[in-house]
Amino acid sequence: RSQGMVVVAVALLALVLPHRAFPAAPRAPSPLLLGDAPDAASIAAATAARAEAASKALADAAQPASEFLLDATRPAIDAATPVLDPVLRATEQARVQWQLYGSEHPAEQVGLGLSALLLLELVREVVAAGGDERPYPRDAYDPDAARAFFVRRPLEVLARAVELGVRSAGFGGALLSDWLAGPAALEANAEERALQLAKVLTALGPTFIKAGQSASIRTDLLAPPYIRGLTSLQDQVPPFPTDEATALIREELGEAEGVEALLDSLSAEPVAAASLGQVYRGALPDGTPIALKVQRPRMARQIALDMLLIREVLAPLASAVGLPGDLVGTADAWGEGFVAELDYSAEAANAALFNANVRQGQLSGSVFAPPVVEGFSSRRVLTTEWVDGERLDRCRAPEDVPRLCSLAMSTYLQMMLQDGVLHCDPHPGNLLRTAEGKLCILDWGLVTTISPDLQLTLIEHVAHLTAEDYAKVPNDLVRLGFVPEGGETDIESSGVVDYLTFVYSTWNSGGGASKLDVPALLARVQELTAETENGLFQIPPYFAYIAKSFSVLEGIGLSSDSNYAILKECFPYLAKRLLSDDSPRARGALRTLLYGGGDELSLSRLSEVASGLESYTTSTTSVSASTGASDEGRKAATEQLAAVLLSEDGNYVQ
């Protein structure tokens, strides 16, 4: 009942404030009424200008109302924030109606009245629905559960939809203007529009920042200028108050011994803030330095609502205007990743699993994830040991970057093709070089699982490409999910294989995208996607994360070596894997690698495989071996090769 009284009080303030604090805005003559009858492009441009002006007016006028409301009702709001969030958004919408349209005309009075009715109905809806339910009851992405949750809260959905519309109106109007002006205007203004889109997504919050980052690698969906523009998106936002963070830490960690001492040790302000949470530096009671990450309040509900709108509204609209691919499936893949990142206990488990896998192989001692401090971690709080290191792209020892890139490539290939759990966020800030020359990988919230069958299919595909056995590529594309079952013949006749052959061979020569006409390449990929019957050639959702991971690694490699060849960097791990895996499918991939499509052994390729094994072993055995300070790696490689060739049990290599 007390929450209901607070809600009614806020609603009454929302109805009164427009009349007291926001008098009717002065009207300027409409640009559409000046001069001769305008053409369509002029109309669109004027519409875009008015939308941008409206957005600015909204931002300028929001502050006094927000400050008044929050100061007047702060104690009650703190106790009932989950219930009041949609009410405050509706209050904002009512205020916007008054500020933009005034009250001089009967039609405008009706619009303002409708806004007031919307607010009052939302008050009733929120009080009736309560604030205890969760859109994802099992704490995992579930579009059906989110739909059932928000269908009982239609005005909360409407309020967010209106907010999205208001914030994106300027960009949408400008893009419409370009479209009406013709293809030349669309192309000429693409770079500017892409940067505008990045700003809009940043303003829309965490879900859209992450969606934009994920879309930035979907070359099958977006034109090159938009790929470049979205690449500039930064997952950095202003921090939330430390007192809120402290309260959440106490709520999550409860009465665990040492919590108060830990809180006392934390830095006064966060050392980093991102869209989902922020990080403080502190120390354990024994003096061990730690990094403590705490999640922003109410993130699950915001992401659930945004993903519902993306999946149910934006994805179908994008398909309707011609964007190719399974956009709903892509949205679901994004949603699974975004929601998974909210579970810091899963992130802790991912990091621990990686460290355990590393300890069992040759990477031990060369690469690691920050160890998790178990007693001070939970679903929304993650505490790890503090790691001092330099970002790879800002390393003060640039001569060491190629070695670390090779180590990183071997590490990610092991995750993808052996361990089956791939770290999906390897941006330069998450890859550190320690003072000892080790590689530290941060932020394990976003991972994807690769099944054993898919691992072997990927190995076979790389072997076919390396051996230039392109006749097997169509079947690979079907098994990898790029082409539906039975589409091999259509793919062969479409020219997809021929074009991919050209791309692979060019990329293998080194230099990355600099050796290719990237705009023409991306345009051709989009053309092939559109030209194949029923959208036959498409990018499967799982591949977006793999592409993101390895494109970042290639970018770091190219920053220190302009001739860096990512396909060649994959070969050492492939050689090691095929020489040590005696399974039937691995045998077939090794035969393809050594014999190509014929029956004659390629001695040069056999030499390359042996050299690849030595390269892998040298780069992963230890820091001293990889830097050439010792011959430990070479000795280990010789021992491994001898063990395979001289094994008493027999194997396919023999």
Image (cartoon, rainbow, N blue to C red):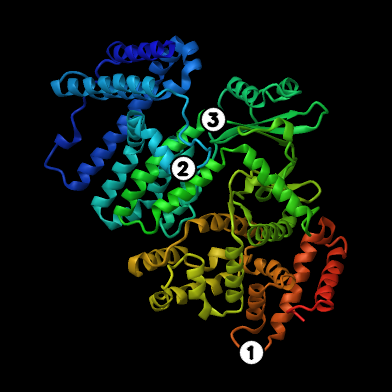
Image side of residue 263 versus residue 322, left or right: right
Crowd band around label 2 with a 10 angstrom C-alpha radius: few (<14), some (14–19), many (20+)? some
Instruction: Pick whichever of labels 3 and 2 is earlier in the sequence.
Output: 2
**Which of 467/234 is in front?**
467
Q: Residue at x 75, y 50 (%)?
A: 356
Say what amino acid the circle numbered 1 marks: Asp
State yes or no: discs 3 and 2 in contact (Cβ < 8 Å). no
Residue 13 visible in the current orientation: yes
Say what amino acid the circle numbered 3 marks: Pro
Q: Nearer the viewer, mark 3 or mark 2?
A: 2
The residue labelled by disc 1 is 599
Q: Horizontal and vertical percent for residue 272?
A: 62, 34
**Relative to 433, residue 99 above or below:** above
**Relative to 272, residue 509 above or below:** below
Tell me the element at label 1: loop
User: Which quadrant of the view contains residue 525?
Assistant: bottom left
The residue labelled by disc 2 is 142
Tell me the element at label 3: loop
Tell me the distance, in whole angstroms, between the alpha carbons under discs 3 and 2.
29 Å
Instruction: Pick whichever of labels 1 and 3 is earlier in the sequence.
Output: 3
**Relative to 626, residue 80 above or below:** above
| Residue 238, numbered circle | 3
Q: Residue at x 57, y 71 (%)?
A: 461
Q: Nearer the viewer, mark 1 or mark 3?
A: 1
